[in-house]
């Protein structure tokens, strides 16, 4: 089957925050389009992978960007020895064969991408392939999921109201300290005491959000620091590499973050 | 026949608001181009589907967007084993074989799309395919319909006066409360009492329009909330998912909407 | 003959305003390029169709737009089983075989379109096809006609002085009330008394031009309203559909126009 | 010979203004690049046609525009049954076989066009066809001529200093009244008394330059008016068509010009 | 093996500044994406070449620029005698066969390039080739490294927060004076006393950073000056050629730099 | 040999200003990239032609412009009877076979051109052809030379600091009066007394630089005037054609320049 490589072989680890698994399961039963909201690195992609695995559905993921065209999603004609041959894009693949299609950061895409999903996200559940005059009726198992980072949108770059209304929403945030430490310990292969130190550093860096930092350290970054420590790098060096250097060049912010690291030891 | 997949098999449910069915029927008898105006999610697409079914005509729908070119509508040459072969676009398909062609949100399209419809929308009723030097005379049953959301246009992005004048207009708005509750109950599969609660929430959210919200909850969103309730999700959770989270990230607006939901219970 | 489909089979109805038929006939005898000026929907296209029929010449019409390239007018190479084959565009077709070529709203086109007509509009009467190194000498019967809407041009989008000087001009405006009523009655199939009512409404709406309306109701719009009345729609509903709803969403303007309709009954 | 269609069969009529024929002849003997400057419609194109005829050289004319690319001038690969075949553009044609190449309004072209002529306009006299790694050494008879309208350039759109310095210049203006009347009489086929009236009208319109008019009536426009008169159109109607309507829509300017026409009768 | 030409044959000379070799080695063992930060010409490229050699891994380097598209990185279909054939881009080559892929100055690239690396830089380690519906799972030896010059970024052109968080960072700066003199002496083939003079000049020029100079003289520039001296050019002339003329046209800055050169002799 | 047409057959005349021949020779021996700086028409191109002849090396010259892409420099796939075939661009030609590659006015080119030369201009001396996954190692005789006009750069259009640092610089200016007169006399075929008059005119025009003129008359323009005089044109007419008309349309500047010409006679 064409979607075979899109099934997840192993259970992706996911620690639930609230009732998000139940809510997503209900929306999935209705095949309702879902919008996953939350900051970068808080586990949105992991959650949707977990749900695809839990529901036994293949998952087609597309990282959207501002140069992506509708054809990149829907498909195009390619030249073959016998002339032009239609080639399904990832969205069409999911629609035709019944996968969950996850459009990551769809706000980054151009308008044509956004409009393409309209007839898929109301009762029609069709995808018109205008270039080949085909109306693809969605497979009964097809579901559309998009991610949306609330901090990123600007007046110039946001989903149209008529697009937003087609989705039901789920809100995500960073896990609470105890749960985050357990996640970091498990994913980085370090003990929970060390992970707790890292979570404390993250907590301080998140307080700097809006005071020069766009966002604080994410769970993902803590795991990266933890892994370096598991390879023998010191807490200080690992935090510098994973939590400080990649996100700011401002000397004052670097000093504040360095102080935070020192204070947690 | 090439238009067979474009006939609607089942009657799309539609609850008339006023005399719009009679007015559209007269315009259709004259094959006059029609402009459907109204806010997002109020039933414009459903109305045109209903009319196509009622009049027994095939319906070719095109979701317009700002990257759409005239060729996307009209057609293009594709490379074949024997050289280039002309491929009718969705508009040409409708013109040649006699469908209702529905250009959804045509204002989003580039100027060339708009100008392409000019010779189709006066007494000439022709579509010049300049790239193959063909003049397609419209099938006697061809009719053009466009949608237009009055709240969206800006100085930079509006139809030209010379385009607007080629259409007759029909105005749509949200149904009154009783009718909307009946529609929501029927479409979501919930009882009318519950649907009436949802309509009350919607009514309050529509009062926030202009106070931070671009638009309030649409009929479409109420149906989505209703369906989640039919799957066992609570009124509060369903309204959060369907009416609040997708449309705003502003904490104050979220609080106002949450209060509105609580007040309706 | 390749231009056969471009001959007009039946006389297009046209009610002369002044001596425009004589002036155009003289310019045609000299094959002088002509610029037709006037507001939208006043009968410019109908006039040129009438003249083509009266002079027994084929008419090639091109609706210009801002995405149109010189190649769209002049032609391009297409890929064939034997390689690339040149394909004349509509302008080249007219130049080579001797048609009247009517470039509708040429100001919308990009600069390259405009410049392409320069060597055709002086004594040289040649069209260089640079891409195939061919100099097409215009057929003795070729004439170029362009339309130009004086209200639309801006500093950014106007013909260059060196282009304007290559044309002789003809000015059009809306017909006087009596003549307009006769035209509306004839084209819509209604009696002249009803048509006179419609003309009165149009007259009032034209007074709103500059007070919120870009243009008032055109003759074309009156005919559309008349046709709806001939299908049994009331004067009020027909005027709303044809004269009010398509052109403005402003509540005050809509009220003014509605008052004007009521006052004319 | 490939340039045969580019020879002028008949002597183009040209009435010299000063010593421009001698100066151009000297520059041609040196094959020096020449820049022809002057307002629109004053006879620049006619002069270069006359010189090509007088010197017995073929003339390749290219009307430049802002969408023109270097490939439009230099050539491109086209797809053939045997693969891609190089196709010389008009400049390469002239360079290779020895024509005068006249780039009309080169300022309109993009930068790449301008830079392409650099190695052709110094001692190297070569045209590198980068896409086929060929260095075309200019035929000994090749000469480059460009036109330049001083009134049109802006800061954003002008030749680079390093381009200007490669040319010697010749200045043109409208002929004096007596000579202009003789030219108009001859070209329009009217008597000199009538032509003198037209020149008087032109003189007045040229005084309006800078007071609302970009340029006054050109010699070309007088000839067009004269030809209409030779077809039986009155002086008033011919001047309206040829001198007033095409160049301004401003009611005051139209009145001034109409007064000027009346005053000359 | 397809990556054979990407192995470094000889050890690239590299003088360590601190513990960067250990830190990079740990990150490489984890295959963690690394961001190398530092000013131009301080040895970032040399460091990554040295590490590739030391770790025995092939190195695929891509110089990013603002016209680079995702296809330039990922690959594209090329037309072949048998139709279209997929051609891996440099990133796909590295991902599929297990090289270190070094994206130099990735900030210069367009957004689509940046987003393409997202699924490669989290636990998924996959590269979706949307155009051929292939999911390339990264070779176990694949590692991604990017360079980032902190002085260059602007609000308009920076990595997205969600991209930055996927990397661990390493900071570089110019070596201290003694080490820099040894590096210059070795690379340019001059004695250390002369190299020390050059380092003094560089030190003074670096103090001008922010006072008219974007950056001072880099280690790379000192080596270039040293090599000219090894060819017999005087210190003054070599410093003018290598340290002054290429970086500023400002007469005052040139005078300051010339003074600095004189003062060091 | 593929570079045969790129060898200079005859010695290009060049009168040295200072020690530029020795400095360039040293840089060439090191194959160091060289940046030639100086105003337009002062002899930069002639110098590099002279050096290529003197060093016995082939010279590949590319006139850069803002529409030039990296592919124009590096090469591209062309379609052939057997599919796509790679075609080296001029830079790749020089890199592979060992020519001096002269990129004239590289600042005009887009960023991708600039970045393409980075790996060629450090110790790596490689040119990655990403589109065919080939790493071209530069021929031992390859050297890169670019020209740079200090007066032209703006904040928006300048080489990046990281590009500038890869070059050693050579400064050019106009020759002193006596040397310039000798050059003009020799190149134009006139006596030195006349040439001295032309140099005086140039000297005065160069004083107007910054007072309305972007640059004064260049040596190139003096030679052009001299050549016209050698064809019998008077000093006044030749200076008008060669020094005044091409570079300014401002009446005051023209008068100043005309006065300067008169004063020199």
Image (spheres, coloured by chain):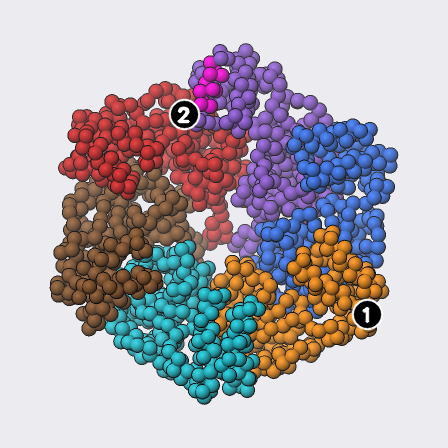
Chain colours: A blue, B orange, C cyan, D brown, E purple, F red
Residue range corresponding to the magenta coloring = E251-262
- Percent x, y for residue A2? 70, 59
Residue B234: tell me if it is visible. yes
CA gap, disc 2 and disc 1: 83 Å
Rendered position, D155 above or below F142: below
- Residue ID at (81%, 62%): B263
Look at the image and say whether residue E257 sits in the magenta stretch.
yes
Of badges 2 and 1, the one in the foreground is 1
Residue under pointer 1: B194
User: Looking at this view, is B112 or C226 the one in front?
Assistant: C226
Query: Which quadrant of the structure image shows residue A55?
Result: bottom right
Q: Residues within 10 Å of mark 1 (few under 14, many from 20)?
A: some
User: Looking at this view, is A52 or A3 the one in front?
Assistant: A52
Considering the numbered disc 1 on the image, is that residue within a helix, a strand or a loop?
A: helix
User: Looking at this view, is C261 or A237 the one in front?
Assistant: C261
What residue occupies the far bottom of the structure in this picture?
C191
Q: Residues within 10 Å of mark 2 (few under 14, many from 20)?
A: many
- Indicate the quadrant containing the N terminus of chain F: top left, top right, bottom left or bottom right: top left
Query: CB atoms at circles 2 and 1 under 8 Å apart?
Result: no
- Percent x, y for residue F162? 53, 31
- Residue ID at (29%, 47%): D150
Residue under pointer 2: F170
- Percent x, y for residue B112? 48, 63
What main secondary structure does the magenta stretch of the protein show? helix
What chain is tagged by disc 2? Answer: F
Residue F218: tell me if it is visible. no
């Amino acid at each position: 089957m064409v979607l075979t490589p899109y099934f997840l072989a192993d259970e992706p680890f996911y620690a639930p925050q609230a009732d998000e698994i139940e809510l997503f399961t209900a929306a999935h039963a209705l095949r309702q389009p879902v919008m996953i909201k939350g900051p970068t690195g808080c586990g949105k992609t992991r959650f949707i992978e977990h749900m695809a695995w839990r529901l036994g559905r293949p998952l087609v993921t597309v990282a959207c960007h501002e140069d992506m065209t509708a054809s990149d999603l829907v498909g195009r004609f390619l030249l073959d020895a016998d002339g032009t041959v239609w080639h399904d894009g990832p969205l069409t693949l999911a629609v035709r064969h019944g996968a969950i299609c996850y459009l990551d950061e769809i706000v980054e895409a151009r308008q044509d991408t956004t409009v393409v999903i309209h007839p898929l996200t109301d009762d029609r559940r069709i995808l018109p392939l205008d270039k080949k005059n085909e109306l693809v009726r969605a497979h009964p198992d097809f579901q559309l999921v998009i991610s949306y980072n609330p901090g990123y949108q600007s007046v110039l770059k946001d989903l149209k109201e008529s697009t937003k209304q087609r989705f039901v929403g789920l809100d995500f945030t960073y896990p609470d300290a105890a749960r985050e430490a357990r996640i970091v310990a498990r994913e980085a292969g370090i003990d929970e005491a060390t992970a707790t130190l890292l979570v404390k550093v993250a907590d301080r860096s998140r307080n700097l959000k809006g005071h020069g930092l766009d966002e604080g350290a994410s769970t993902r970054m803590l795991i990266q620091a933890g892994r370096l420590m598991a390879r023998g790098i010191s807490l200080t060096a690992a935090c510098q590499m994973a939590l400080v250097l990649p996100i700011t060049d401002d000397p004052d912010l670097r000093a504040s973050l360095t102080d935070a690291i020192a204070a947690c030891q």
